[in-house]
Image (cartoon, rainbow, N blue to C red):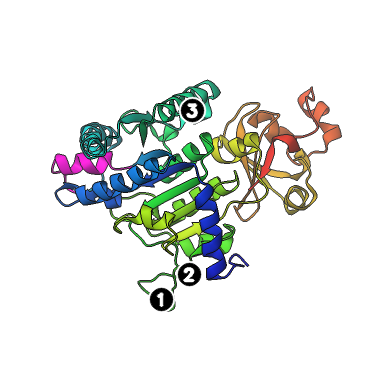
Amino acid sequence: MTFQVSREEGLQLRQSYLKKAKRVVVKVGSAILTAKDGLNNDVIENLAQGLAVLKKEGREVILVSSGSVAAGRKRLAMARHDISLKEKQAVAAVGQSSLMRAYEDVFETYGQKVAQILLTHDDFSHRDRYLNVRNTLFTLLGWKILPIINENDTVSVKELRFGDNDALAAMVANMIEADIFICLTDVDGLYSGNPNTDAEARLVNTVVKVDHKVEKMAGHVSGLLGTGGMRSKIHAAKMVSVRGACSFIGSGREAQILQRLFVGEPVGTFFLSQEEKMQSRKHWIAYTLRPKGFLVLDDGACNALLKRGKSLLPSGIIEVRGSFGIGAPVHCLDIHENAVAAGLVNYKSSDVEKIQGAKTTEIDGILGYKDSDEVIHRDNLVIL
């Protein structure tokens, strides 16, 4: 079972984690940041007040904020409809200045300096850029400045996009080794069913582990201005939990939500960290690198990976999708299209196509060389 703790035990566990939490990442979505006439100043004030309290308590805080595109649409009086990538980039450029101006004004009343950092997925995929961002964040935290991070919509292309700021925030939390990731959204938390259609649906206070049952509860509903929906928030919580941190999902519209969370009120949904912490490199393979291709595996190969801890051999591959080079990240799928593993390949896609289904002793005869018996070695493979 996913929920093997009582409500009371769950609340005690969250309090024990929160008391020890020294480094906090808070993500706020566009659905609550935006009002009909522009940015929702009440929400921003509520957020600033809560973050100021956390800072006063001696915690290090980073804010990941959506809202630049939504703010830009409002400022330009642009109707809600599909827009092209170049239009979205221009709208983000307009909205980002409004968003930061609002944050600077409200945090100034609390004597808090802020700094803006705009990121793309590429900043996490390249080690040198990753370390540069990490060093900048730690420097700002050392100076007691509040970093405000957003996706760089103005320059992002499809290949560099996070897809939603939930993933961005989770990656930032893992980058700085945060103790807790807080996601403020337009819902109270995770429900056992859809509260709009299911009278028996109840708020889940504590999630011990994100599994298929939890992901199913998340559904596929997203807000009017947001892009993530509950499913992406659950995935972000999972990304953080396997690196040893906790997560929280709650309503950013509730007054003093952050203060109430940290004093022990039973608000929102709290996700416990996993006892077995995934290695940094394997987490990078599984959750940061984007697959350049896919390998479809037969049942025997899936069983070898999932149950026997084996490497991926060419004999178990039945299909190769995409074009990729040696060392590229790929995802392994079962015959039902479920992702079962992620890893770095030892052969380029054209060579994998030639040796798929073959025995390791046949690789040299087929390719004229053999660099490895394994298409993906166990050391470079992560079970998903």
Which mark is nearer the camera, 2 or 1?
Answer: 2
| Residue 320, quarter of the rendered image | top right
Crowd class of label 3 (few under 14; some 14 to 19; many from 20; radius 10 Å):
some
The residue identified by callout 3 is 134
**Pointers 2 and 3 in contact (C-beta within 8 Å):** no
Q: Which residues are magenta?
A: 66-79
- Residue 223 counted in the magenta span: no
Crowd class of label 1 (few under 14; some 14 to 19; many from 20; radius 10 Å):
few
- Vertical side of 237 occupied by 376: above or below: above
Q: Is residue 67 left or right of residue 151?
A: left
Q: What's the amino acid at mark 3?
A: Arg
Q: Is residue 144 left or right of residue 294?
A: left
Q: Secondary structure at mark 1?
A: loop
- Vertical side of 66 occupied by 364: above or below: above
Q: What label sits on residue 192 in the rendered view?
A: 2
Q: Residue at x 44, y 24 (%)?
A: 139
Q: Residue at x 73, y 39 (%)?
A: 356
Instruction: Using the numbered discs, state the Cα–Cα distance from disc 2 to disc 1 in whole angstroms.
Output: 9 Å
Q: Secondary structure at mark 3?
A: helix
Residue 222 in view here: no
- Residue 71 counted in the magenta span: yes
Q: What's the amino acid at mark 2?
A: Ser
**Pointers 2 and 1 in contact (C-beta within 8 Å):** yes
- Mark 1 or mark 3, earlier in chain: 3
- Vertical side of 374 occupied by 229: above or below: below
Task: Please provide percent x and percent y for residue 187.
Answer: 36, 60
- Mark 2 or mark 3, earlier in chain: 3
Instruction: Using the numbered discs, state the Cα–Cα distance from disc 1 to disc 3 in whole angstroms.
Output: 44 Å
Q: What label sits on residue 198 in the rendered view?
A: 1
Instruction: Using the numbered discs, state the Cα–Cα distance from disc 2 to disc 3 in whole angstroms.
Output: 37 Å
